[in-house]
Amino acid sequence: MPWFSQSLYEILERLSSDIARIERKLDIYARAERRRDEMAQADIDRLKTAVERNATVTGSAVTLIQGLAQQIRDAVDDPAELQALASSIESQAQGLADAITANTPTPPADPLPQP
């Protein structure tokens, strides 16, 4: 028998086993946390891309509208040119409306009626 009692040895064995079990659980939690962080970062990256794309589209729409306004001012004395601009505006407006409709998510249905 060692210089310490058997019960002390058993206590140390149980503690060692408990520590190993705790370490395994901590590893599982750490991996899960890393996965959540990676998923959150991916969501942030997708959101940044969407914001950048929207800013580009908005800027393009503003440029288009400003350009059309100037073209109308420039063609004020030419009825044929004004008619061509009107047709161009209608065509571009429909394209813009279609793009907005195609890329606008529908809001979720309200699951609970409001009292």
Image (cartoon, rainbow, N blue to C red):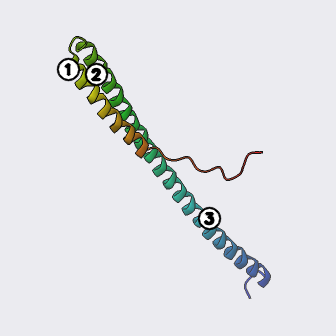
Question: Left of 49 or right of it: where is 106?
Answer: right
Instruction: Please say if the residues under marks 2 and 3 sit with CB atoms less than 8 Å apart.
Output: no
Q: Give the amino acid at mark 3.
A: Leu
What amino acid is at disc 2?
Answer: Gly
Q: Secondary structure at mark 1?
A: helix
**Tag on residue 67?**
2
Camera-side residue: 42 or 59?
A: 59
Q: Nearer the viewer, residue 80 or 114?
A: 80
Judged left or right of residue 24, residue 13 is right
Are dots 2 and 1 in contact, CB under 8 Å? no
The outermost residue toward the bottom is: 1
Circle 2 packing at 10 Å, graded few (<14), some (14-19), many (20+), is few
x, y percent for residue 19: 67, 70
- Calculate the distance from the C-alpha at mark 2 to the C-alpha at mark 1: 18 Å
Q: Which residue is rendered at x = 54% and y = 63% of the image? A: 31
Tag 1 or tag 2, which sits nearer the N-term? 2
| Label 2, label 3: how far apart the Cα atoms are | 61 Å
Q: Amino acid at mark 1?
A: Ala
Where on the picture, by quarter, is residue 70? top left
Q: Residue at x 39, y 37 (%)?
A: 97
Instruction: Work out which quarter of the rendered image holds the N terminus and state it.
Output: bottom right
Give how far across and how far down residue 96 sits, in percent.
36, 36
The spot of residue 2 in percent (x, y) is 72, 84
Few, some or many C-alpha atoms within 10 Å of disc 1 (few <14, some 14-19, many ≥20)? few
Q: Going from the N terminus, do you reach mark 1 or mark 3 first?
A: 3
Res 4 → quadrant: bottom right
Which disc, if any, is residue 26?
Answer: 3
- Look at the numbered disc 3 and give the secondary structure of its residue: helix
User: Residue tagged by mark 1?
Assistant: 80
Q: CA distance from mark 1 to mark 3?
A: 76 Å
Residue 59: image quadrant is top left
Q: Nearer the observer, disc 2 or disc 3?
A: 2
